[in-house]
């Protein structure tokens, strides 16, 4: 989890580090974002179907991951 957010933080700093890193890193950032969104949906399923209880902190993290996925797919030029 923390590695995912660290990766996105590095991605946001790429314009400062240099434009030569942006293209190759952008693919990996999008790939990891897709994996994180799928894994978040899986964990939501585990919470509801298996555990039959919801964790408020987990729901916030799932919402943030889905929101990041949403912005990466619909607005790729802004991110």
Image: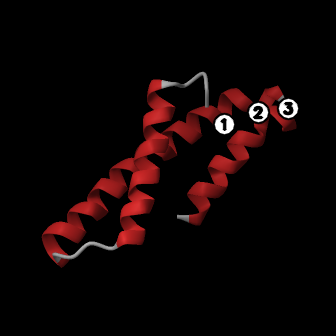
Q: Which residue of the protein is positioned furthest toward the top in this rendering?
A: 77
Compared to residue 8, the image places residue 76 above or below, namely above
Disc 1, SS: helix
Q: Residues within 10 Å of mark 1 (few under 14, many from 20)?
A: some
Would you name the residue on which mark 3 appears? 18
**Residue at (22, 68) in percent of width and height:** 46
C-alpha gap between disc 2 and disc 1: 6 Å
The reply, left or right, for residue 33 in relation to residue 14 is left
Q: Nearer the viewer, residue 21 or 51?
A: 51
C-alpha gap between disc 1 and disc 3: 12 Å
**Mark 2 and 3 residues: CB-CB less than 8 Å, in contact?**
yes
**Residue at (66, 56) in percent of width and height:** 6
Would you name the residue on which mark 2 appears? 21
The reply, left or right, for residue 52 in relation to residue 56 is left
Disc 3, SS: loop
Compared to residue 25, the image places residue 50 above or below, namely below
Q: Quadrant of residue 51?
A: bottom left
Q: Quadrant of residue 50?
A: bottom left
C-alpha gap between disc 2 and disc 3: 6 Å
**Residue at (61, 26) in percent of width and height:** 78
């Amino acid at each position: 989890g923390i590695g995912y957010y660290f990766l996105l933080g590095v991605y946001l700093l790429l314009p400062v580090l240099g434009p030569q890193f942006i293209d190759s890193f952008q693919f990996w950032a999008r790939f990891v974002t897709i994996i994180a969104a799928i894994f978040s949906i899986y964990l939501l399923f585990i919470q509801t179907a298996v555990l039959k209880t919801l964790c408020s902190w987990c729901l916030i993290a799932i919402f943030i991951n889905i929101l990041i996925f949403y912005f990466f797919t619909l607005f790729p030029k802004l991110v």
